[in-house]
Image (spheres, rainbow, N blue to C red):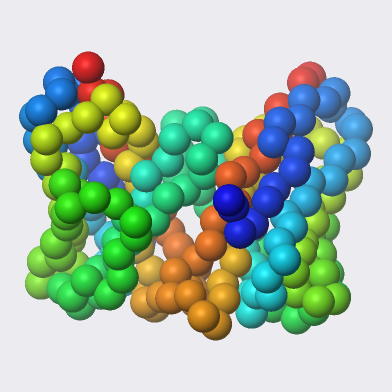
């Protein structure tokens, strides 16, 4: 069974630009969660989608948005990039929604904002 | 303020030594997960503990959930370089829809 695939793996943007990251979950998983990881901060929850519906959202500004398609693939978008948005963005898929069940993570998309 | 405090933040030891890392909170969790993240990879689940006082062993790794379900520990016996990574704990609370994550313990095992 193929794992969680995130694209692109690395990208460099400048302040003010926008970026779209993609995540393909494990086949059959309907939950996709997005996390931001920065050194010393652990994983900060962005949002979770389950069956194309946003189930929960973390404490991030409205510049961060996402969506999920009917095939469970998900995208997240960050508009008007700031230097502080530089981070590893991780996507995780799960069979279950919420805080139960195992999360399967992709390798992440490392975003650098200059 | 982190709801889940992990300690130490960083640990570097020689191969063959034993170590313990901690995940502490003042809140009660219905379950707690431990993940390991290696450089360039996403976190991978090691274990889930559910019952207060529960002990689970995974080869040289021993996980314990506190009796009051507020804390957990991970003990590694005879550490090996392959144990190097970031160890993250994540707790599930009935009052919170999403997992609560600790900031992690970065472990380096030197050959």
Residue at x 16%, y 47% (from the top left corner): A63
- Rendering coords of residue A66 (x, y %): 17, 57
Identify the residue shown where x is 77% and y is 21%.
B110
Task: Locate residue B80: give its quadrant.
Answer: top right
Please state which of residues A80 and A53 is positioned toward the viewer in this rendering. Answer: A80
In the rendered view, tell whether residue A81 sits above or below residue B104: above
- Which residue occupies the foreground of this view, A41 or B60? A41
- Image position, residue A54 (x, y; %): 22, 71
Q: x and y percent of residue B20 in the render?
A: 84, 45
Above or below, B10 relative to A25: above
Tell me what residue is drawn at x 36 percent, y 36 percent. A88
**B102, above or below A15, in the image:** below
Question: Is residue B110 among what the camera can see?
Answer: yes
- Side of A61 where B34 appears, left or right: right
In the rendered image, the residue lying farthest to the front is B1
Displayed quadrant of residue B105: top right
User: Could you tell me which quadrant the C terminus of chain A lies in?
Assistant: top left
Locate residue A16 relative to residue A36 in the image: left or right: left
Depth order, front residue of A112/B17: A112
Q: Quadrant of the N terminus of chain A?
A: bottom left
The reply to whether residue A107 is in sight is: no
Side (left or right) of A13 relative to B68: left
Q: Residue at x 16, y 42 (%)?
A: A78
Please indicate whether residue B111 sits to the left or right of residue A78 in the image. Answer: right
């Amino acid at each position: 069974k193929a794992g969680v695939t995130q694209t692109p793996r690395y990208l460099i943007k400048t302040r003010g630009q926008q970026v779209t990251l993609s995540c393909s979950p494990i086949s059959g998983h309907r939950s996709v969660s997005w996390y931001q990881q920065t050194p010393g901060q652990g994983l900060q929850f962005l949002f979770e989608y389950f069956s194309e519906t946003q189930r929960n959202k973390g404490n991030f500004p409205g510049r961060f948005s996402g969506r999920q398609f009917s095939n469970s693939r998900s995208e997240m978008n960050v508009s008007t990039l700031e230097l502080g948005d530089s981070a590893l963005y991780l996507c995780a898929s799960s069979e279950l929604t919420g805080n139960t069940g195992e999360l399967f993570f992709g390798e992440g998309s490392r975003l650098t904002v200059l | 303020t982190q709801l889940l405090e992990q300690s130490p933040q960083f640990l570097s030891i020689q191969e063959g030594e034993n170590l313990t890392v901690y995940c502490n909170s003042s809140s009660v969790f219905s379950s707690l997960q431990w993940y390991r993240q290696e450089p360039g990879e996403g976190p991978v689940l090691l274990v889930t503990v559910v019952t207060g006082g529960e002990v689970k062993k995974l080869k040289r790794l021993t996980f314990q959930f506190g009796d009051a379900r507020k804390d957990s520990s991970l003990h590694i016996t005879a550490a090996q370089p392959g144990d190097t990574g970031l160890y993250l704990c994540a707790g599930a609370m009935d009052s919170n829809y999403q997992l609560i994550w600790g900031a992690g313990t970065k472990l380096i095992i030197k050959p």
